[in-house]
Amino acid sequence: MPSSFKELGRSLLETPNAGVCYDDGMKDKKLVPFLAALCLFLSALEYAVPKPLPFLRVGFANLPLLLALGKLCFSDMLLLALLKTVGQGFVSGTAFSYVFLFSGAGTFASMLAMVAVRRLFLRFGRRERLVGFVGLNMAGALASNAAQLLLARFVLFGQNARYIAPALLSAGSASALLLGLFAGGFARVSRWYASLPAADSA
Amino acid sequence: MTLPPKANAACSAFFARRASPPQLFFIAAACFPAFMLQRNLAVLAAETACFFLLALARRGKINALSPLAVLACVTAFGALTPYGRVWFRVGSFPVTYPALAGGLRRALLLDGMVFLSQFAVSPRLTLPGRAGAVLAGVFACLDRLTSGAPPLAAKAAFARGGFAGLFRALDARLYEAYYRVSPLADKLPLPDPPPLPETQSGGIRLRQARRPAASLLLALPPLLMYAALFLPHG
């Protein structure tokens, strides 16, 4: 057990085998652009889904980030989140708008929360997966919604942001549960996913 | 909202001849501060409407429902905290002019920025350097995912085999797209320079320069917007 919170924080960011490394240390460099492209593809698909409110989104575009956990090292996860945000801004043409800011904040908050939760459970579970895709996605969705609500509070709605918080958080949790189940089911049967090397294998 | 085909073709030809994607990007970047600093509500509404028309001309079609929903929602949320002069009442709830105007201003800024972005930014916009190369690699992958193989018949796959069938279809598409792609990061594809057009006699002529007067026209919108900042605001 870590002796202090500082040690706990440091341990959450480090893994014994950081990086997507084969034995000779060569990184699989095409995975990050491919996953970023998959994010953009799913984001375009998401626009076709009718939404009850313009701010509520299903979160398809976060699936590649979820699947990338354990396959990419932390720096590659950061790059993937950045490519997803910038690429979405270019494809949907929202690079100059508040949408870009909200998208970036949500993506990075979600990614950091999922990485932190996964590392925490790996560290204490001694390599046994105590949290699956559902738990990780729920953590990511709550972090993303919290970041976006904070932005809405200080940038858009002021104190009135509290009125959209219940709808946003409950819809986000529901969609995170369904997407987590979907991701778990897909990862279990997918040859493509199984063929990708693990980032932190022993 | 979609432009008629003839109008769409005319607008596409205009943008192809008169302005490159980087020029449009820098013009929009120049307009951005003037738009954000505008205090006059009527001028802000006019600028938002202009950006909407420009985005429609550039893209050919725009989803008008979502911006309208954003306009209504953000304005209504702004009016939920009444302060100042009461303008009218909805039942017993007072709607005050400063609160409503503040909400409307925020809504117009939000929608205007979206339209400005849709006008200025496109996947064909290339950034310089390593960042541009990485982004080009991402779009190359996206092209691989969305073209080539027959479209993923998700509904048919789900109808045949339920979720298992859908997962198998998705997996097959991802496997084929991923392993068919050559290592991108090693040789990130930079966009090829456009070939110089040949004349009918077989020689090569220099690329025709865009008319400078037309390019100067593109500098007008930012100048007008900065001049509009000095208009009185209520």
Image (cartoon, rainbow, N blue to C red):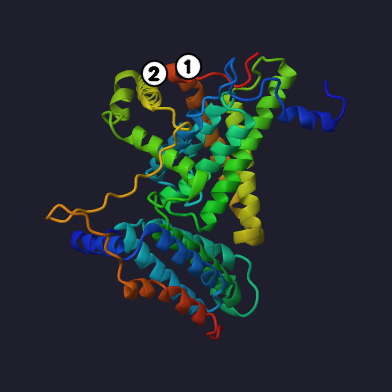
Q: Quadrant of the C terminus of chain A?
A: top right
Q: Quick one: SS at disc 2? A: helix
Query: Can you say whether B124 is above or below A171 in the image?
Result: below
Query: Can you say whether A182 is above or below B206 in the image?
Result: above
| Spatial CA span between label 1 and label 2 | 19 Å
Q: Looking at the picture, tell me which residue is in the foreground, B78 or A33.
A: A33
Residue drawn at (47%, 34%) of the image: A33
Q: Is B113 displayed left or right of B162 in the figure?
A: right
Q: At which x and y percent is residue A21?
A: 59, 21
Is residue B98 at least partly visible in the picture?
yes
Q: Residues within 10 Å of mark 2 (few under 14, many from 20)?
A: some
**Dot 1 amino acid type:** Ser
- Any mark on residue A195, and which? 1
Residue drawn at (38%, 65%) of the image: B52
Q: Quadrant of the N terminus of chain A?
A: top right
Q: Is B118 displayed left or right of B17 in the figure?
A: right
Residue drawn at (61%, 42%) of the image: A108
Pinpoint the chain carrying mark 2: B
Residue drawn at (36%, 24%) of the image: B180
What residue is shown with label 2? B164
